Amino acid sequence: MRLDKVIADMGIGTRNEIRKACRALRIAVNGETVKDPSVHVDPETDLISIDGEPIQYQKYVYFMLNKPKGVISSTSDREPTVIELIDCTVKGLYPVGRLDRDTEGLLLITNDGPLGHQLLSPRHHVEKEYLVTARDAIREADCAKIRTGMKIDKGEVTLPAEIALIGDRECRLILREGKYHEIKRMFAALHNEVIALKRIRMKDLVLDETLKPGEYRALTEEEIASLYD
Ligand code: URA
């Protein structure tokens, strides 16, 4: 496997950044400085280091993406998908849960199937926190319905959710389930409309606000561990 691909697949940088690091003589394989990013290495047996720090080959990779509007949360589509935003060719990458095309914010992208299964399982009630901007003022009576659980369309009833107003038309909303278009359907049932939606947290994983829409980074060890608790 190419050296730049091995390192990019581990989420340590984009291939472009890795090429630059090679040119700057920062990368070594088995103790020998490597200038050519296309050199072939075996990630299981070769010792790769950057600035003298060995890097560990990992089976699973984890990225936090700040999903931009206009991109689909799926693995393949005729339209641009979130996976195409990630410079990593590891097989089996998928987004953990879906955000609507016009929703922005935190999306976990990984090839760790069991973790995704656990986070999405309806039995686990994993918290997802959103910033919502509505068309019209959000009333206390609306908040009360959201807090107790409310009827939305197609006879569905939502689980109790947490809501805190941060402006006349803005709130923080914490869901513990993931019904299709849930927040939009809640607001529609309240005769209001969601005009902007951003996810800022999933379980203990908080969106890194230094990431601009479309940018991503690898999760830290602590962030990965917090998702497993
Ligand atoms: N609820 C919605 O309506 N849309 C999302 O993208 C996420 C939650």
Image (cartoon, rainbow, N blue to C red):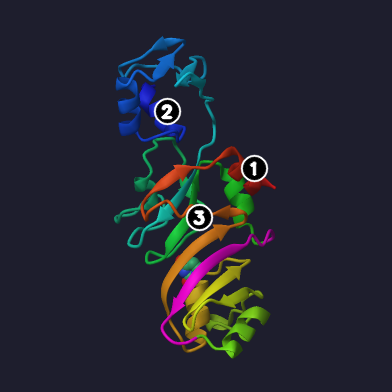
- The label on residue 90 is none
Q: Nearer the viewer, mark 3 or mark 2?
A: 3
Please give left or right for residue 42 compared with residue 128 in the image. left
Q: Is residue 51 above or below residue 84?
A: above
Mark 3–mark 2 distance (CA, rounded to whole Å): 24 Å
Residue position marked by numbered label 2 in the rendering: 7
Element under disc 3:
loop
Q: Classify mark 1: residues with Cα within 10 Å, few (<14), some (14-19) or many (20+).
A: few
Residue position marked by numbered label 1 in the rendering: 225
Could you tell me if the residues under marks 1 and 2 are in contact, i.e. CB atoms within 8 Å? no
N-terminal label among 1 and 3: 3
Element under disc 1:
helix
N-terminal label among 1 and 2: 2
Residue position marked by numbered label 3 in the rendering: 207
Q: Nearer the viewer, mark 1 or mark 3?
A: 3
Where in the figure is residue 129, as x and y percent of width and height? 56, 65
Where in the figure is residue 132, as x and y percent of width and height? 48, 73
Element under disc 2:
helix
N-terminal label among 3 and 2: 2
Where in the figure is residue 213, as x and y percent of width and height? 37, 56
